[in-house]
Image (cartoon, rainbow, N blue to C red):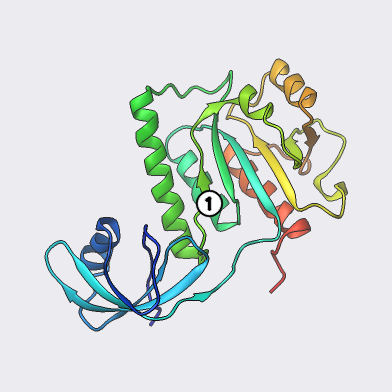
Amino acid sequence: MRIPRIYHSTLLSDHSEIVLNDDAAKHVSLVLRMKKGQWLHLFDGSNRLFTAEIIRLDKKKVFVRVDAGCVEDRESPLHLHLGQVISRGERMEFTIQKSIELGVNVLTPLFSERCSIKLSEERLEKKNQQWRKIAIAACEQCGRNIIPEIRAAMSLSDWCQQQDDSLKLTLDPQAKKQINTLPLSVDKVRLLIGSEGGLSADEIDMTFNNGFEGIRMGPRIFRTETAAIAAITALQLQFGDLGRG
């Protein structure tokens, strides 16, 4: 039987007894319905994995005994920052979940001219919390021991103007260059994925003026959630760790 993986939000210590945080306790007791004497794998975002035994449960708390932790690195050598224009409904949640399973390190939700999502500051904060929970659940499922960063939403123009030494890419079905013609040695990529309606002509010009390079994935046009997954997969195959152990 597979041992469940649970994220614990504070740093863990070797050979200690702890009380699981509220979210972890609810998942263990109410969702998984685990009992005293059963075992968990715990991770705290520090890239270490711990084995822990449940020693006591009550209505709201789960007490565990933590064994020695070990480093278990499942991070890709490719550092990937995804700028994703916010999409409707479950599409954004799907994109976050699958991109993290595929190894994205940082994800920034973006607003663009054709983004139809309008959120108050309060609702945006709730969305960000929800997206972070999706990121944590994706890590619990896929085996990553570092939680990717879900940054605060910002405008497309502000994000594009941020300076770093990444290769900057945006999908463009009209681009001449294909993804498999990129340089062979790349370890940092900033990837922009637009909304359902794509980017406006002014936005496309703005991305190019800020150093982004248009690439195409082939003859077909993807939905926004498909575009992100397809591009990340191709980048991980070419520069990362997909197909390598």
Q: Which part of the image, by quadrant, shows the C terminus?
A: bottom right
The residue wearing badge 1 is 148
Tag 1, which secondary structure? loop
Q: Is residue 233 above or below residue 112?
A: below
Left/right placement of residue 130 relative to residue 225 reads left
The image shows residue 8 at horizontal and vertical percentages of 36, 62
The image shows residue 38 at horizontal and vertical percentages of 28, 81
Q: Residue at x 66, y 61 (%)?
A: 76
Q: Is residue 102 above or below residue 4?
A: above
Q: Residue at x 42, y 46 (%)?
A: 132
Q: Which part of the image, by quadrant, shows the N terminus?
A: bottom left
Q: Residue at x 37, y 72 (%)?
A: 4
The image shows residue 199 at horizontal and vertical percentages of 66, 24
Which image quadrant is residue 220 in?
top right
Q: Is residue 197 above or below residue 102?
A: above
Foreground pick, 231 / 64: 64
Q: Is residue 30 above or below residue 49?
A: above
Q: Which kind of residue does numbered mark 1 sit on?
A: Pro
What count of labels does the image hold? 1
The image shows residue 211 at horizontal and vertical percentages of 79, 30
Categorize mark 1 by other alpha carbons within 10 Å: few (<14), some (14-19), many (20+): many
